[in-house]
Image: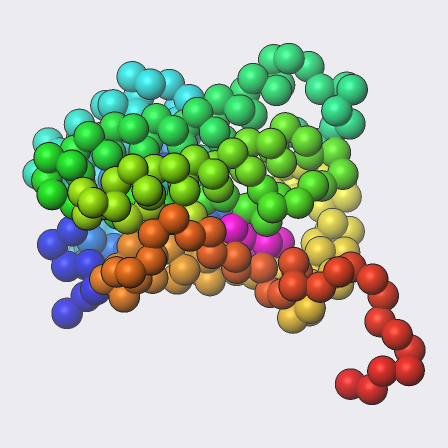
Amino acid sequence: MGKLDGRVAIVTAGGAGIGAATVRRLAAEGAAVVVADLSGTRAGAVAESVTGKGGRAVPIKMDAADPDAVERTIALALERFGRLDIMVNNAGVAELAPMHEISIESWNRVIAVTLTGTFLGMKHAIAIMRRQGGGVIVNTASISGTAGDYGLSSYNAAKAAVINLTRSAAIENARHRIRVNCVCPGAINTRAPELLGREMADEVRRRQSAATPVGRLGEPEEIANTVLFLASDDASFITGAAIVADGGLTAHTGLPHWPTWKE
């Protein structure tokens, strides 16, 4: 018997990386999942990987920044599965550039997908969950929402806002039996280095691994496990939390080891 038997979830940006791992993890615990992704092809492939193992999943092409697309996605969950119990707002984009070189178009897109897309998913899910008498929302934030990164100012701003938006929604909806939390991943082994660093992707991964106290990148499945915990009844007394999953990266000051210390 799965932890999420009989429940229905939506995962945005569910076609790759953390999103795809989350879809598979929730489905493995019994949830029916709507796989929403900007790429309909990726969404379909992930949904097929679930249904091929006897699970329940349906794909939809969705731009998280498009209000109509978000509403259609929630409507699909209700049409196909009859309810919505878990909303995972995972979509986000970033641009690597110094602040003074960021165009207003790029700024607006990062904010639209990463912050406004999270708001839209929460807004429409909460309306359904209040009528149902409860539900769970898990937002993907980042350790980049807790401190600054060189060259990622728009992403830093958006992810910091996601953390506080999560808190606001949590206190507004606690009495309605809706829990709202976010997970803050550190350096995770996804395609992000290729998308941001391009020819420097391998070096980015090497440096991120070296900076992480556990000595490696996290895997998408490890973040999916955190999402599962927050979505399940195991986390029934947790709301308004920002759960850091970063291999210890933010636990230290960043100062170098003293050579006199013994391991």
**How many numbered marks does the figure carry?**
0
Q: Hey, which quadrant is residue 165 in on the image?
A: top left
Looking at this view, is 98 or 56 the one in front? 98
Q: Position of residue 182 (x, y in %)?
A: 42, 48
Q: Hey, which quadrant is residue 247 in on the image?
A: bottom right
Q: Position of residue 139 (x, y in %)?
A: 40, 43
Asked if residue 1 lies left or right of residue 240, the reply is left
Bounds of the magenta segment: 184-189
Can residue 235 be seen from the camera position used here? yes
Asked if residue 129 lies left or right of residue 162, the reply is left
Q: Does residue 119 lie above or below 173 as drawn? A: above
Q: Does residue 6 lie above or below 106 as drawn? A: below
Q: Does residue 26 lie above or below 67 as drawn? A: below
Asked if residue 104 lies left or right of residue 122, the reply is right
Q: Position of residue 119 (x, y in %)?
A: 38, 29
Q: Quadrant of the N terminus?
A: bottom left
Q: Main secondary structure of the magenta part?
A: loop
Q: Does residue 104 lie above or below 132 as drawn? A: above
